[in-house]
Amino acid sequence: MQLPVQITYRGMTSTAAIEDAVRDRVAKLEQFHARIMSCRVVIEQPGRHKQQGKQFVVHVDVKVPGGEIAVNRDHSEDVYIALRDAFDAARRKLEDFAREQRGDVKHHEPTQSGKVARILAGEGYGFIVTADGRELYFSRENVVTPAFERLTPGTEVHFIEEPADERPQAKRVSARKGA
């Protein structure tokens, strides 16, 4: 399908090579979302009278059912690099948008805060007391940072509470910044 593409130039003149590069990149976007409705691309060369090299700015706006993807990539001295970077960013946003629409987005469990209540270093586990006074078990394997051996009673930590066989446990335990 021939996708409607609008290309606008500001502060510069169009060339067939740039037009072809834009249309090739738009065609590649269709691999990542089959229902793109339109694409607008603005290529500009602001401040043409500067002493330094020419700078190009590329804006890409892609419309899809249920949303719009907008990308701005500033300042590359090569128009083709500016195009590449802008379309790469648009591709990543389009992939993320498609994943969200499919429901493939990973949802992270909320973290909680607490303090290390006690450590049984020889056995490789310890307990965290939560803000509401409950104690949760955690093992050496559940500690992200710092190393298990560096945790001491009273250390403030973040963790994810997870059900276990006997009672809830703390997973992904990490010391709070500045603690």
Image (cartoon, rainbow, N blue to C red):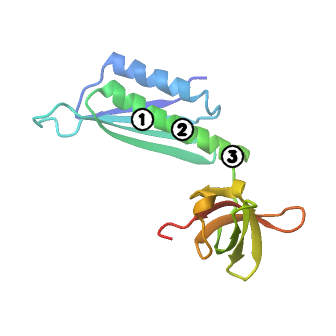
The quadrant of the image that shows the N terminus is: top right
Q: Earlier in the sequence, mark 3 or mark 1?
A: 1
Q: Earlier in the sequence, mark 2 or mark 3?
A: 2
Q: Residue visible at 20% across and 31% down?
A: 54
- Real-space Cα distance between discs 2 and 3? 14 Å
- Nearest the viewer among 87 and 140 is 140
Image: 162 above or below 96: below
In the image, taking residue 144 as reference, residue 47 lies left or right, namely left
Task: Give how far across and how far down residue 161 sits, in percent.
Answer: 74, 66
Number of labels in the image equals: 3
Is residue 103 at least partly visible in the picture?
yes
Identity, as a three-letter code, of the amino acid under mark 1? Ala
Q: Earlier in the sequence, mark 2 or mark 1?
A: 1
Q: Residue visible at 17% across and 31% down?
A: 53
Image: 29 above or below 121: above
Q: Quadrant of residue 3?
A: top right
- Real-space Cα distance between discs 3 and 1? 22 Å
Identity, as a three-letter code, of the amino acid under mark 2? Arg
**Residue denoted by label 2:** 92
**Residue denoted by label 1:** 86
- Real-space Cα distance between discs 2 and 1? 10 Å
Secondary structure under tag 1 reads helix
Direction right: furthest residue: 165
In the image, taking residue 133 as reference, residue 90 lies left or right, namely left
**Residue denoted by label 3:** 101
Direction bottom: furthest residue: 133
Is residue 108 at least partly visible in the picture?
no
The reply to whether dot 3 and dot 1 touch (C-beta < 8 Å) is no
Q: Quadrant of residue 15?
A: top left
